Image (cartoon, rainbow, N blue to C red):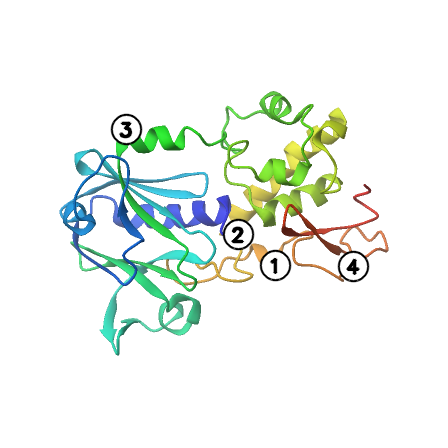
């Protein structure tokens, strides 16, 4: 599932291209994706048409388009979704990019489920092979209440070490699911939680209340390090994620432990990365560097 760095990379690209643009048409083959939330009544398409994009931002793993008339469009990639920006033509019950390159040639960009037509003839499309992604129309005030239930942003200036300690210290929960809990910290998923725990030398099955002050300090630093590196490399495209121009991110080339089952630990400790399940998720760790 795309995490904070992937979503942030998408937002930064899209924001530079669509501000001030207006929706002039909408197409979808997945009606459940285009839904009105909260107290909004009416047809999704009719309500979206004519709305101007005022801003594009990220909250946790959500992309939020702030629109005119106090509406917001929320996009969540879920497992395999991603937004694309370009121009497509309908052919043989599908959509084909008008321009050669990854938008046309990369199969992961071909599962077009949703297209917003903009007033400059560009199109904002949503590709999602597994159809789990969601696109929702909210009133600004109601969306703000919904998003307020999420935890703090880990790269926000206000989220400092003291705030992190308040969240982590004394908790009897296993550390990996804890830092992935979106109501505790927003935006961290399996990839970056795995790598942060490896970087800080903490076993993913440790309980939070067993961590020393030094370990908590190291984990805080490691979380920020891997998230920033993820953003610098425009996300992780080890599997499904693609950027809005259709290209791949590069963080998969810098993964610390995630996906490295059976490979030598980068710390040159002589051990190999092992894979286990923690909280139902595949988890990778070094048995030497991350002792339980």
Q: Decide which of 105, 90 is in the foreground and name it.
A: 90
Name the element at disc 3. helix
Q: Nearer the viewer, mark 4 or mark 3?
A: 3
Quickly name the residue at label 4: 264
Task: Kindly report the distance in space between the C-alpha atoms of the residues bearing marks 4 and 1.
Answer: 15 Å
Quickly name the residue at label 3: 141
Name the element at disc 1. helix
Of pointers 4 and 1, the one earlier in the residue sequence: 1
Q: Decide which of 38, 262 is in the foreground and name it.
A: 38
Whether pointer 4 and pointer 3 mark residues with C-beta atoms closer than 8 Å, the reply is: no
**Residue found 65% across the figure and 40% down from its top:** 176
**Going by the image, does 102 lie left or right of 93?**
right
**Residue found 29% across the figure and 31% down from its top:** 142
Of pointers 1 and 2, the one earlier in the residue sequence: 2
Quickly name the residue at label 2: 233
Q: Position of residue 254 (x, y in %)?
A: 63, 54
Q: Position of residue 69 (x, y in %)?
A: 17, 35
Task: Kindly report the distance in space between the C-alpha atoms of the residues bearing marks 4 and 3.
Answer: 50 Å
**Residue found 52% across the figure and 34% down from its top:** 155
Q: Position of residue 208 (x, y in %)?
A: 70, 31
Whether pointer 1 and pointer 2 mark residues with C-beta atoms closer than 8 Å, the reply is: yes
Please identify the residue farthest to the bottom as the structure is shown: 92
Q: Nearer the viewer, mark 3 or mark 2?
A: 3
> Is residue 129 positioned above or below 289 on the image?
below
**Going by the image, does 193 lie left or right of 146?**
right
Name the element at disc 2. loop
**Going by the image, does 136 lie left or right of 158?**
left
**Residue found 37% across the figure and 69% down from its top:** 110
> Is residue 26 positioned above or below 290 on the image?
below
């Amino acid at each position: 599932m795309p995490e904070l760095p992937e979503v942030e990379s998408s937002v930064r690209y899209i924001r530079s291209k669509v501000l001030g643009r207006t929706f002039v048409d909408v197409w979808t083959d997945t009606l459940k994706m285009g839904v009105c939330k909260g107290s909004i009544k009416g047809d999704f398409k009719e309500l979206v048409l004519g709305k101007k994009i005022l801003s594009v931002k990220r909250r946790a793993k959500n992309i939020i388009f702030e629109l005119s008339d106090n509406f917001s469009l929320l996009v969540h990639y879920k497992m395999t979704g991603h937004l694309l920006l370009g121009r497509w033509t309908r052919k043989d019950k599908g959509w084909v990019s008008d321009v050669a390159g990854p938008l046309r040639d990369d199969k992961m960009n071909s599962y077009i489920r949703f297209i917003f037509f903009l007033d400059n003839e560009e199109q904002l499309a949503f590709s999602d092979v597994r159809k789990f992604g969601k696109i929702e129309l909210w009133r600004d005030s109601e969306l703000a209440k919904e998003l307020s239930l999420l935890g703090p942003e880990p790269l926000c200036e206000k989220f400092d070490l003291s705030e992190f300690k308040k969240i982590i210290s004394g908790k009897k929960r296993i550390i990996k699911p804890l830092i992935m809990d979106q109501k505790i910290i927003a935006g961290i998923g399996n990839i970056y939680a795995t790598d942060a725990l490896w970087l800080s030398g903490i076993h993913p099955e440790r309980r939070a209340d067993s961590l020393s002050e030094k370990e908590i300090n190291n984990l805080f630093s490691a979380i920020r390090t891997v998230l920033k590196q993820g953003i610098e490399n425009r996300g992780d495209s080890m599997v499904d994620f693609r950027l809005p121009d259709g290209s791949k991110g590069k963080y998969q080339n810098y993964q610390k432990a995630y996906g490295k089952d059976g490979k030598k630990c980068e710390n040159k400790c002589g051990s190999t990365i092992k894979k286990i399940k923690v909280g139902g998720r595949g988890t990778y760790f070094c048995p030497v560097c991350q002792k339980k």
